[in-house]
Image (spheres, helix red, strand yellow):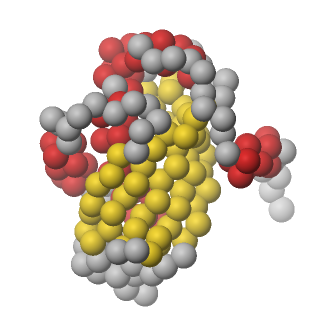
């Protein structure tokens, strides 16, 4: 089940926090609870993605993205991601989430997040996110205008552009074996 209560707590926790620029980092902490575990008693890989929501959504609120999306009647969706898992996370581990939008192209916003336990990075994710309307994807340029932000993206890191290129060559829909 989706952790709506935890998301509400994160949103409340940062409701009076200073506004962030779209590319400024948002940092928060979460705890890995027993119901976040898989049968091997470590953080479930799917729940990891959900915990990243607990950093990304408050980041979007603090930057004004959520406000603009609601005002315009749009939505936000994850259009792709790649995750690197490196360290086990166990019950009751306290995790620090770092979230930031690192740039955009003509269709998507790219958000980088990492999860830390002490000085160890346990996982890292790149999210390709789209703002959507009834007509389809809303161009980031239009989204940024609705936020009152400049439309020019910071340069995307090489590893991100390589991922974008690789994804463009990936067949869709996939071929069935």
Residue 30: give x, y in percent of width and height: 27, 63
Q: Quadrant of the C terminus?
A: bottom right
Closer-to-camera residue (155/72): 155
Q: Which residue is depicted at the point 53% across and 62% down?
A: 124
Relative placement, left or right, of 36 versus 144 is left
Q: Quadrant of the N terminus?
A: bottom left
Residue 46: give x, y in percent of width and height: 46, 64
Where residue 57 sits, quadrant-wise, is: top left
Relative placement, left or right, of 158 versus 13 is right
Residue 41: give x, y in percent of width and height: 37, 85
Q: Which residue is depicted at the point 40% across and 17% down?
A: 147
Q: How many marks?
A: 0
Where residue 110 sits, quadrant-wise, is: top right
Q: Which residue is depicted at the point 35% across and 40% down?
A: 59
Closer-to-camera residue (65/43): 65
In the picture shown, does residue 161 fall above or below 35? above
In the picture shown, does residue 173 fall above or below 105? below
């Amino acid at each position: 089940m989706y952790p709506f209560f935890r998301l509400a707590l994160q949103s409340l926790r940062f409701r009076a926090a200073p506004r962030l620029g779209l590319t400024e980092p948002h940092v928060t902490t979460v705890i890995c609870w027993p119901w976040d575990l898989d049968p091997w008693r470590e953080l479930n890989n799917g729940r990891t993605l959900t915990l990243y929501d607990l950093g990304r959504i408050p980041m979007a609120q603090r930057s004004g993205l959520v406000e603009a999306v609601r005002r315009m009647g749009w939505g936000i969706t994850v259009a792709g991601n790649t995750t690197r898992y490196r360290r086990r996370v166990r019950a009751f581990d306290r995790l620090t989430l770092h979230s930031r939008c690192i740039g955009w192209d003509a269709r998507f916003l790219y958000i980088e997040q990492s999860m830390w336990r002490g000085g160890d990075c346990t996982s890292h994710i790149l999210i390709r996110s789209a703002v959507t309307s009834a007509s389809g994807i809303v161009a980031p340029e239009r989204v940024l205008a609705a936020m009152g932000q400049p439309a020019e993206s910071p340069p995307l890191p090489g590893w991100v552009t390589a991922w974008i290129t690789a994804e463009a060559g990936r067949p869709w829909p996939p071929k069935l074996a």
